[in-house]
Each structure stands twice: as structure tokens, then as C-alpha cells.
Amino acid sequence: MAKIVYFCLKKLLRMNTSKDWFASWFDTSYYHILYKYRDQKEARLFMANLVVFLGLKYHDKILDLACGKGRHSLFLNSLGFDVVGADLSQNSIDHANEFSNETLRFVQRDMRHPLNLKYDAIFNLFTSFGYFENDSEDLQVLENIKNALKSDDSVAVIDFLNVEKAVKNMTTEERILRNNLKFNISRSFKNGFIIKKIEVVTPTETLNYFERIKYLDLKKIQSYLDAKGLKLTHTFGDYDLQEFDVENSNRLILIITK
């Protein structure tokens, strides 16, 4: 009987609910294996373009909100900025902290919780917004960002997916082999969310995870910003900071002030 209960609990723990999918999936080694080939050169180019466009100054304080393992934070710090990286995943924070120094530190934090410090710039990158089922939670994130901006001249950047193009050009099925693991991926659009189901086939078992991003087009995000008294000053469609084009842009990059 005890073995049956243990098996059931183990199986339950592997199943992430729609509410906490990001907590369970992002904290696994499989997540980092699947995405280990993210383009570091592109990420650095994006950060370099941003800091020049925003006119950030040496030693300005930047928050990398939902920093993952800290790839953007590390590069920003190398440019001379005082950087704090924050992420929900303790595993990611533990890894990132191996590179911390006097002007670079990492903390475990849920972005829905108020931020303790004030910043010259807050970056929320690589589609780390729109995870939550209720609009009130997304609005709370924006409220926290607003309250953590040091002054009216401070700026927030949200790097989001161009959901209109993503849905229109969706690849519904994909198979990836990596590190002796099979990732069977299926994508769909349902009930206002873009859903990616990820089946991880290991030599001994099959595990199931998913990612779920809210369908937030520019009009919807603008309504969020209006509700929180935030101003959208610029929109870009890629990491070269080209003009946003709803038909052709892969990204929706938002420059926001109080």
C-alpha cells in the first residue's frame, strides 16, 4: 500500500498545473537542455542596442526580472552596470550566483511580489510576461515594475512575443533530440493562450510539461499599461530595434516609462 501511495505522489509531483507550470518546468534540468542553444550573440547584441538607445549611464542600477541563469545580467554587468537578476527558479539562481560580484547579484523572487529596491531600468526579457491565468496577476507585475522605477526618467523594457504572427505561423508538431533525450513538442492556441506541450522521453521514463503564454497583442498590453498609469514610448519588432510590424515582426519589444 505504501508503495502505491508513493508512486501516486511521485506521479502527481511530475504533473504541473495550469497555475504553476512555470515553477515546475523552469526548475528542471530538461528545460535548460531544451533551450541550451539560445543565441548568446543575439542576446548580447540586443542588450548593447538597448543600453545605447535608452542612454543608460555607467553604474546605473538595472533589474533583470525573470533572469533565468543570468545570461543577460552577466553581459549588462560587463558593460559597467550595477545589476540585480531575479528569478522564480532557485536552481537558476544558484547557477547564476556562481558569477556574482560586488555589482552583480541574484535573488530568488516571484515577479508578482513587490520589489524592494529602486532601479534606473527594469528589463523583462525573452517572453517572461503573460504567464498567469488572471489579468490581475499580470497587472500586479506591472504595478511592481512601476513602483520599482527610481524616477520618471527611469524605464522598463518588456520583450514579448508577437502573438499575432506566432499564432498565424504556428508549427504544431516538432521533434527534437538532445543529450540522449527526445522532446516531442506540440503547439496550440486555446482559450486565449498559446500552449506548448513538451513530452520528455528519457531512457527510463516519459515526463510531461507545458508552457502557456497569454495572447497579448499590442492593444491588450496597451490596456494593461493604461490601467496602471504607465506610458508606452516605443515599440520594436526585433533585437536590432527595427520598427514593429504586426505582420512580419517576431518580437514585440515595449519601452515603458511612468
Image: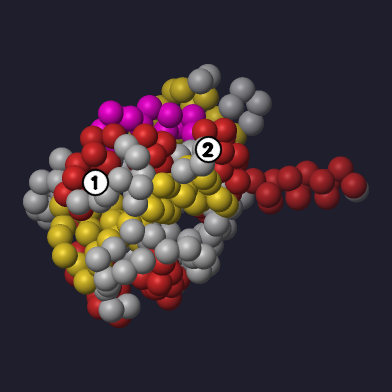
Is residue 98 found left or right of 228 in the rendered image?
A: right
Q: Which residue is mark 1?
A: 51
- Position of the C terminus, as image quadrant, is bottom left
Direction from residue 247 to residue 172 in the image, left or right? right
Q: Which residue is mark 2?
A: 100
Coloring applied to the structure? secondary structure
Q: Is residue 34 a member of the stretch shown in magenta?
A: yes
Marks 1/2: CA–CA distance:
21 Å
Q: Residues within 10 Å of mark 1 (few under 14, many from 20)?
A: some
Q: Residue at x 28, y 28 (%)?
A: 41
Q: In the image, 57: left or right of 11?
A: left
Q: List x then y, in percent, for residue 138.
A: 40, 68
Q: Which residues are magenta?
A: 28-43
Q: Residue at x 27, y 71 (%)?
A: 152
- Residue 72, visible in the rendered structure: no
Residue 4 percent coordinates (x, y): 83, 46
